[in-house]
Image (cartoon, rainbow, N blue to C red):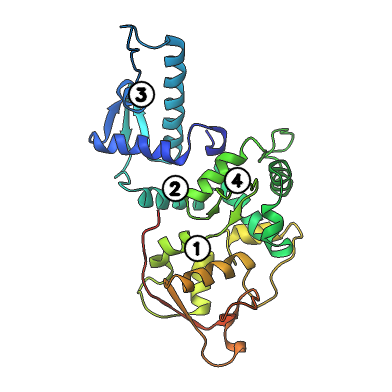
């Protein structure tokens, strides 16, 4: 079951289920889980339980959440029990890191691979058209553009890889992972901003917590975040003909994210020598940082 095909399987609900299994020692009966996560209340003037049909539908929705958690390799079923497959994440931050790592490791033919492929398209589209154009799209146009770029799931399959119905769930997951914002009033599109994800995973980008040269830093970004500059999904997104960043310059989305890390004192960008020795950022006349040759981590705060 795809994360995008299950409207009830949103991040907070999946984390609630995982937290319940963890709190109960890694195992809970499915009936108890449904009772915990969707309890039935008796009315004040009646001893009868709520409408059985409604209760059945509620149970089905909780089972959908379980199937999403199972697809994320966190839980599985053993007869009538739901059991943890590993040490389950205890915080939203740890859960987001697990989901991100899971999505990054999926093969291209997995139904959930579309999650980060769609994000890479956003990065590519913003490069040539600007983030304002991306944000200003209607949900229908946004989904249509992504579906056209990603293609169909298989030859002769009429089901699109992405559509307006899947868009709300996709935006929720991307925002939860720290890859953007979907809660701005009046906006039907999505604002890509990977700065929170970069902050959370800065230990992977600067493993020694020490100064690193710009080229090594960007190379680690490409391997850790395949939808950003130099990554496999990033390259795939630009293969459709969208305008690439100039040679030696980072994309608009990554440039803004790096500037955000500098502004929030997570990272210091240093320039030694002249601009020819460093990596250029997407030009911003209001920023004092337009190229850097080295980075120094400052601190990592928890934002998820």
Q: Nearer the viewer, mark 2 or mark 3?
A: 3
Look at the image and tell me whether residue 53 can be seen: yes
Front residue (pair 279, 176) = 176
Whether residue 110 is visible here, answered yes or no, is no
Q: Earlier in the sequence, mark 3 or mark 4?
A: 3
Q: Which mark is residue 195?
A: 1
**Label pair 1/3, CB-CB below 8 angstroms:** no
Q: Position of residue 225 (x, y in %)?
A: 52, 60
Residue at 44% from the left image edge and 74% from the top image edge = 267
Residue 123, percent across and down? 64, 59
Relative to 184, does residue 275 appear above or below in the rendering?
below
Say which residue label 3 marks.
34
Dot 4 falls on a residue whose secondary structure is helix
Residue bearing mark 2: 99
Front of the two marks 4 and 1: 1
Circle 1 — which element? helix
Report, in whole angstroms, how far the alpha carbon at label 3 lies from the one at label 4.
30 Å
> Does the residue at mark 4 contact the one at mark 1 (Cβ under 8 Å)?
no
Label 1: how many Cα within 10 Å (few below 14, some 14–19, many 20+) = many
Answer with mark 2 or mark 1, whichever residue precedes in sequence: 2
Callout 3 secondary element: helix
Pinpoint residue 111: horizontal percent, then vertical percent. Answer: 57, 40
């Amino acid at each position: 079951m795809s994360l995008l095909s299950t409207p009830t399987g949103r991040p907070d609900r999946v984390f609630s289920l995982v937290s319940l299994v963890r709190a109960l020692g890694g195992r809970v009966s499915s009936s108890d889980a449904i009772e915990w996560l969707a309890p039935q209340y008796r009315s004040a003037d009646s001893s009868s339980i709520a409408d059985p049909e409604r209760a059945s539908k509620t149970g089905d929705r909780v089972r959908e959440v379980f199937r999403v958690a199972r697809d994320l390799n966190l839980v599985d079923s053993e007869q009538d029990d739901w059991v943890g497959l590993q040490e389950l994440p205890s915080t939203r931050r740890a859960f987001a890191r697990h989901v991100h790592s899971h999505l990054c490791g999926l093969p291209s033919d997995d139904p959930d691979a579309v999650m980060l492929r769609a994000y890479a398209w956003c990065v590519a589209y913003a490069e040539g058209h600007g983030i304002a154009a991306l944000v200003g799209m209607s949900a229908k146009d946004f989904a249509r553009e992504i579906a056209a770029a990603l293609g169909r799931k298989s030859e002769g399959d009429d089901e699109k890889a992405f559509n307006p119905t899947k868009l709300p769930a996709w935006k929720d997951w991307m925002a939860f992972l720290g890859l953007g914002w979907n809660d701005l009033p009046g906006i039907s599109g999505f604002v890509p901003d990977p700065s929170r994800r970069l902050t959370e995973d800065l230990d992977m980008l600067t493993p020694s917590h020490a100064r690193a040269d710009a080229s090594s830093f960007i190379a680690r970004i490409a391997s850790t975040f395949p939808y950003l500059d130099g990554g496999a999904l990033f390259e795939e997104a630009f293969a459709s003909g969208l305008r690439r960043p100039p040679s030696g310059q980072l994309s608009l989305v990554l440039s803004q994210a790096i500037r955000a890390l500098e502004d929030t004192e997570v990272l210091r960008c240093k320039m030694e020598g002249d601009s020819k020795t460093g990596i250029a950022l997407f030009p911003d006349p209001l920023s004092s940082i337009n190229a850097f040759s080295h980075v120094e981590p400052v601190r990592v705060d928890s934002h998820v």
